[in-house]
Image (cartoon, rainbow, N blue to C red):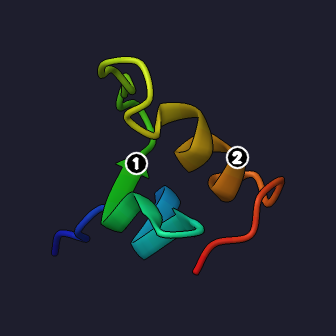
Amino acid sequence: MSIAPPANPALLDISDVSKSFGSVEVLRSVSLQVTRGEVVTDIGPSGSGKTTLLRCVNFLESYD
């Protein structure tokens, strides 16, 4: 008899996060899942929404 190991639960799981500032759409339907042991980097050009995404994930910014 063998027992399957438990599934690796998500430590962070966001789905369809969007954020606008007035008419400027900063995030559009962003989804992300991070599980134990994964290393994730948020990279992109200035003004692409990296900090806004992290602020939304940490509930420092409301999202649409």
Q: Earlier in the sequence, mark 2 or mark 1?
A: 1
Q: Which residue is rendered at x = 44% and y = 29% of the image? A: 47
In the figure, 46 relative to 57: above or below?
Answer: above
* Three-letter amino acid code of the residue under disc 2: Arg
Mark 2 lies on a secondary structure that is helix
The foreground one among 9 and 61 is: 61
In the image, residue 38 above or below residue 45: below
Residue depicted at 35% across the width and 57% down the height:
32
Left or right: residue 4 versus residue 16 is left
Answer whether residue 8 is visible to the viewer in this image.
Answer: no
Residue hosting label 2: 55
Q: Identify residue for label 1.
A: 35
Residue at left offset 77%, top offset 58%: 61
The outermost residue toward the left is 1
- Does dot 1 land on a helix, a strand or a loop? strand
* Mark 1 residue type: Thr
Whole-percent x, y for residue 27 in the image: 40, 59
Asked if 15 appears above or below 50 in the picture, the reply is below
* Residue 12 visible within the image: yes
